[in-house]
Image (tube, helix red, strand yellow):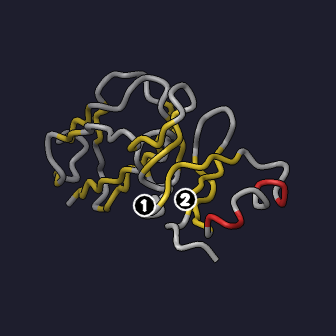
């Protein structure tokens, strides 16, 4: 076994760069490792570094580097509204074409602010899980 630091690798989607798996192996086995998984898109990304968290990074195919996943800047005018059908929370910052859910019902953003109103007291969970953006959640409470 070598005294060198472990080699870090990622396996990613060949089109999007979404990282499916990360790991590290001793440098002695680098050559023999990729042939064990011939259908995977394998990249060696460094030696002696921490194994990246695949939920926080992606593989930028254009520059062959691991990059942080971008964070959406989603804002709301308020997180608590009156359950009167008139009061509203205005949510902005969801780019056009990005899918999101409100209580598991799927929507596609048009880039315009979203107005949330309710006549029933309830909590509503807005969630965005749209690669390459980091996952995002917020709650609007109608009371």
* Identity of the residue furthest to the bottom in this view: 1
Relative to 133, 36 lies left or right? right
Q: Is residue 91 above or below residue 48?
A: above
Relative to 128, 24 lies left or right? right
Q: Where does the image place residue 116, in percent across and percent down from the top left?
A: 29, 41
Closest to the observer: 78 or 98? 98
Between disc 2 and disc 1, whose residue precedes?
Answer: 2
Q: Where does the image place residue 30, in percent across and percent down from the top left?
A: 69, 59
Closest to the observer: 14 or 94? 14
**Label 2 residue SS:** strand
Q: How many marks?
A: 2
Mark pair 2, 1: CA separation: 7 Å
Q: Residues within 10 Å of mark 1 (few under 14, many from 20)?
A: few
Q: Quadrant of residue 61?
A: top right
Numbered tag placed on residue 96 in the rendering = none
Q: Quadrant of the C terminus?
A: bottom left
**Label 1 residue SS:** loop
The residue under the point 49% across, 25% down is 97
Q: Where does the image place residue 28, in percent across and percent down from the top left?
A: 68, 67
The residue under the point 30% across, 53% down is 138
Q: Is residue 43 above or below residue 21?
A: above
Q: Quadrant of the N terminus?
A: bottom right
Numbered tag placed on residue 8 in the rendering = 2
Q: Are marks 2 and 1 in contact (CB under 8 Å)?
A: yes
Relative to 135, 29 lies left or right? right
Closest to the observer: 129 or 15? 15
Closest to the observer: 39 or 82? 39
Numbered tag placed on residue 49 in the rendering = 1
The residue under the point 35% across, 53% down is 137
Relative to 8, 68 lies left or right? left
């Amino acid at each position: 076994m070598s005294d060198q630091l472990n080699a870090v690798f990622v396996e990613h989607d060949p089109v999007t760069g979404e990282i499916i798996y990360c790991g590290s192996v001793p440098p002695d086995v680098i050559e023999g490792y990729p042939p064990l998984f011939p259908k995977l898109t394998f990249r060696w990304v460094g030696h002696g570094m921490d194994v990246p968290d695949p939920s926080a990074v992606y593989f930028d195919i254009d520059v062959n580097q691991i990059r942080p996943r971008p964070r959406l800047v989603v804002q709301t005018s308020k997180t608590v509204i009156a359950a009167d059908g008139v009061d509203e929370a205005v949510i902005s910052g969801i780019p056009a074409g990005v899918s999101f859910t409100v209580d598991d019902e799927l929507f596609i953003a048009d880039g315009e602010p979203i107005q949330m109103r309710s006549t029933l007291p309830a909590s509503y969970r807005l969630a965005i899980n749209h690669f390459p953006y980091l996952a995002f959640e917020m709650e609007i409470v109608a009371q």
